[in-house]
Image (cartoon, helix red, strand yellow):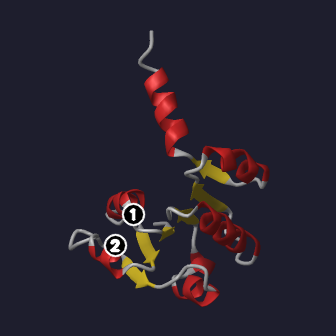
């Protein structure tokens, strides 16, 4: 069973947390209590209402034990900064961050980070329908 830390409980974070909490140890961190509450009773993990920019929050969430960290906030800069901290300070090998601004995607990739960009994914999927 993997220990998974998800930062951000928007649509992507919520969906991933609900899915993974069925079979993995999942902790979700968000600074919005309302967002965490949307996980409902089906969520079988831990919720932390706090700011992920605080290393105390990351440690409380178990970043030192994390096998993988997903940074899925709507703030690209926050995702980048926290991903660097998680990787450099805590040595988490697998760090995946969401990037919303396509122009930042290349810059973030140059940092050696694993990037998910919804627009790029959608274009790739839609392109597959053209025969």
Indicate left or right for 65 with 123 as reference: right
Q: CA distance from mark 1 to mark 2?
A: 7 Å
Residue 103: image location, x then y, percent: 67, 45
Residue named by callout 2: 35
Q: Are marks 1 and 2 in contact (CB under 8 Å)?
A: yes
Residue 85: image location, x then y, percent: 71, 74
Near mark 1 (Cα within 10 A), the count class, few <14, some 14-19 or many ≥20, is: some
The residue depicted at 45 percent of the width and 66 percent of the height is 1
- N-terminal of the pair, mark 1 or mark 2, is 1
The residue depicted at 27 percent of the width and 70 percent of the height is 38
Residue named by callout 1: 10
SS of the residue under disc 1? loop
SS of the residue under disc 2? helix
Residue 9: image location, x then y, percent: 40, 68
Residue 69 image label: none
Indicate left or right for 6 with 93 as reference: left
Answer above or below: position of 99 versus 119.
Answer: below
Answer above or below: position of 46 versus 127.
Answer: below
Residue at the left extreme? Answer: 41
Near mark 2 (Cα within 10 A), the count class, few <14, some 14-19 or many ≥20, is: some
The tally of labels here is 2
Location of the C terminus (image quadrant): top left
Of residues 106 and 26, the one drawn nearer to the viewer in this rendering: 106
């Amino acid at each position: 069973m993997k220990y998974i830390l998800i930062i951000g409980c928007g649509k992507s974070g919520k969906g991933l947390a609900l899915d993974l909490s069925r079979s993995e140890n999942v902790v979700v961190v968000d600074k919005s209590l309302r967002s965490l509450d949307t996980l409902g009773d089906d969520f079988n993990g831990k919720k932390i209402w706090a700011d992920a920019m605080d290393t105390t929050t990351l440690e409380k969430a178990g970043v030192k034990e994390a096998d993988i960290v997903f940074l899925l906030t709507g703030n690209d800069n926050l995702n980048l900064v926290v991903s660097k901290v998680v990787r450099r300070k805590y040595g988490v090998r697998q760090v995946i961050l969401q990037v919303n601004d396509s122009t930042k995607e290349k810059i973030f990739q140059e940092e050696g980070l694993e990037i998910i960009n919804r627009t790029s994914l959608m274009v790739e999927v839609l392109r597959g329908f053209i025969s």
